[in-house]
Image: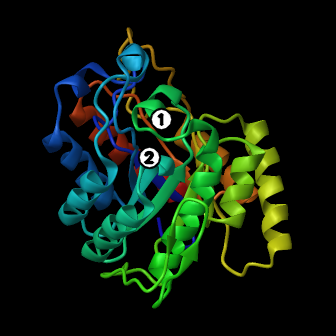
């Protein structure tokens, strides 16, 4: 998985336990299993591991969302100390939930301590009851997200940061330490519509769609590429696309509700290569698994059987 090849990332197990997707073994698992998977992905050459963000789950949504949602910056910073090279993606931080100045400090510190391995995936959020509990105006989440991204960039890039926005204003301040990566960690924007794609081009460095059809991916990528070309920006606009759940070791439980993409490694590689031809820079892969050991075995199988074909 060298620099000239498409990259592959995974979402960490256990850290979020959405009903219908969480496997039984994850319910009783914890830091040991999360660390084991992260270290395996690091050893096998995966490009990133990802952890998502919800602060508090309303009980009315517990059945659908599950209760556990590990705090992403703390989790990824810890795993950064246990790994050597893999990048650490917040996928995604719901920006309106967080004070952007405090978030800038914690992300900068995590990036410094991990020697520049943080990628800041952000989103505007969708769970209206959670916004209400946190006393954040749901209807203003888009405007807040745009402003908070600009605050992060200003605090990380400027020696004398100043900002005069609707929600925050500051000058004559210092944020230190600043990130290890220069000029700052990449900011990737999550979501599946044209407004999100436009935000990712205008304010961020990349786009991370979720559960999107190939047709929608192609259409929105073309839209984003056109916006990026018109913007005149010299830095690339990266797309991280999801891929159907895979089973490379043939151990799918007969009773699982997770649909697995069963195909020969060459066919999987061909599909991924078509995505690369569209301009996809990374693919988020996932696997059927009924234990931590089985998930690690799936990671090993993909790295040894599929990745070398790309």
Q: Which residue is drawn at 13% across and 43% down?
A: 32
User: Can you give x and y, in whole percent of width and height, for residue 237 in the image?
Assistant: 67, 67
Residue 97: which disc? Answer: 2
User: Can you give x and y, in whole percent of width and height, for residue 12 in the image?
Assistant: 34, 43
Q: Residue furthest left?
A: 32
Which quadrant holds the C terminus?
bottom right
Q: Which residue is drawn at 85% across and 63% down?
A: 226
Question: CA separation, marks 2 and 1?
Answer: 7 Å
Disc 2 residue crowd, few under 14, some 14–19, many 20+, Cα 10 Å: many
Q: Give the number of marks.
A: 2
Residue 131: which disc? Answer: 1
Disc 1 residue crowd, few under 14, some 14–19, many 20+, Cα 10 Å: some
Q: Give the camera-side residue of 60 and 187.
A: 60
Q: Which residue is drawn at 37% across and 84% down?
A: 174
On screen, residue 203 versus residue 251, left or right, reads right
Q: Is mark 2 on a helix, strand or loop?
A: helix
The quarter of the displayed image where residue 18 is located? top left
User: Can you give x and y, in whole percent of width and height, for residue 286 in the image?
Assistant: 45, 38
Q: Cβ–Cβ below 8 Å for labels 2 and 1?
A: yes
On screen, residue 178 versus residue 259, left or right, reads left
Q: Can residue 53 be seen in this view?
A: yes
Q: Which residue is drawn at 40% across and 31% down?
A: 133
From this view, report whether residue 176 is shown above or below residue 122: below
User: Can you give x and y, in whole percent of width and height, for residue 80 in the image?
Assistant: 25, 63
- Sequence order check: which comes first, mark 2 or mark 1? 2
The quarter of the displayed image where residue 84 is located? bottom left
Q: Give the camera-side residue of 130 and 191.
A: 130
């Amino acid at each position: 998985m060298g620099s000239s090849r498409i990259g592959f990332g995974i979402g960490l197990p256990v850290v979020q336990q959405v009903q219908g997707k969480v496997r039984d073994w994850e319910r009783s698992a914890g830091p040991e299993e999360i660390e084991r998977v992260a270290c395996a992905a690091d050893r096998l050459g995966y490009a990133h591991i990802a952890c998502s963000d919800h602060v508090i789950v309303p009980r009315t949504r517990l059945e659908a969302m599950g209760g556990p949602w590990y705090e992403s910056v703390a989790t990824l910073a810890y795993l950064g100390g246990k790994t050597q090279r893999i990048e650490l993606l917040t996928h995604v931080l719901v920006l309106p939930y967080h004070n952007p100045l405090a978030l800038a400090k914690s992300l900068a510190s995590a990036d410094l301590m991990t020697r520049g391995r943080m990628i800041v995936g952000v989103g505007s959020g969708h769970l209206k009851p959670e916004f209400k509990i946190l006393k954040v105006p749901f209807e203003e989440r888009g405007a807040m997200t745009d402003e908070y991204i600009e605050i992060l960039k200003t605090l990380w890039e400027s020696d004398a940061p100043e900002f005069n926005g609707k929600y925050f204003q500051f000058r004559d301040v210092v944020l230190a330490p600043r990130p290890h990566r220069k000029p700052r960690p990449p900011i990737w924007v999550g979501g599946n519509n044209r407004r999100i794609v436009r935000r990712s081009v205008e304010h961020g460095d990349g786009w991370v769609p979720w559960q999107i059809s190939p047709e929608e991916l192609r259409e929105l990528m073309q839209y984003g590429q056109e916006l990026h070309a018109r913007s005149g920006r010299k830095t690339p606009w990266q797309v991280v696309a999801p891929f159907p759940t895979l089973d490379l070791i043939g151990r799918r439980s007969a009773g699982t509700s997770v649909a697995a993409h069963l195909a020969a490694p060459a066919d999987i590689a061909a599909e991924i290569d078509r995505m690369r031809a569209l301009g996809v820079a990374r693919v988020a892969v996932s696997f059927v698994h009924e234990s931590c050991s089985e998930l690690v075995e799936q990671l090993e199988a993909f790295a040894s059987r599929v990745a070398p074909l790309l």
